Image: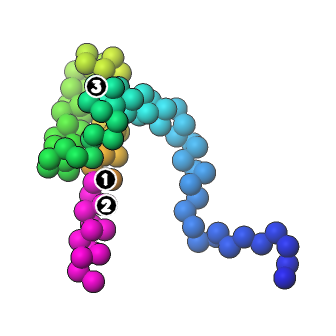
Amino acid sequence: MEEGLKFDNEKPQTDLLLDFSRALIEVAKLATFGAKKYAPHNWQFVENGEVRYTAALLRHLFEGQVKDIDEDTGLSHDIAVAWNALARLELKLRRLEHEYNTTI
């Protein structure tokens, strides 16, 4: 057997996310703010989360057209747009995974 083999050619290149280090640090700041304000990991238990995070995403997108900084967090509305997009996507993927697993 040849040494140094690793069969990861078809796996996602997660290291490419390092290209977004600045943006992801800002999203982490907002996540930290939310964890302190509500509770860590609380976001995933919000009722109708997909719908509510979509609405929040749009609110921040529109408010960001008027002024850059969100008065509540002191961070850019663009960061809130990104956070809400990630929360919405995560909940949607979990829902689809659950629906798939319950239909097999």
Three-letter amino acid code at the position of disc 2: Leu
Mark 1 → mark 2, Cα distance in angstroms: 6 Å
User: Which SS does the magenta portion mostly show?
Assistant: helix
Across and down, in percent, residue 52 comes to 16, 43
Across and down, in percent, residue 87 comes to 30, 46
Residue receiving disc 1: 89
Residue 13 circle label:
none
Mark 3 → mark 2, Cα distance in angstroms: 26 Å
Residue positioned 49% across, 32% down in the render: 25
Residue 75 falls in image quadrant: top left
Q: Which residues are magenta?
A: 91-104
Mark 1 → mark 3, Cα distance in angstroms: 22 Å
Depth check: give the residue in front, 66 or 28.
Answer: 28
Callout 2: 10 Å neighbours few (<14), some, many (20+)? few
Across and down, in percent, residue 85 comes to 31, 45
First in sequence: mark 1 vs mark 3: 3
Across and down, in percent, residue 99 comes to 23, 71
Q: Is residue 23 left or right of residue 94?
A: right
Q: Residue furthest front?
A: 39
Residue receiving disc 2: 93
Q: Quadrant of the C terminus?
A: bottom left
Three-letter amino acid code at the position of disc 1: Leu
Callout 1: 10 Å neighbours few (<14), some, many (20+)? some
Asked if residue 101 lies in the magenta stretch, the reply is yes
Residue 18 visible: yes
Callout 3: 10 Å neighbours few (<14), some, many (20+)? few
Residue receiving disc 3: 37
Residue positioned 26% across, 30% down in the render: 38
Do residues under tags 1 and 2 come within 8 Å of each other at their CB atoms?
Answer: yes
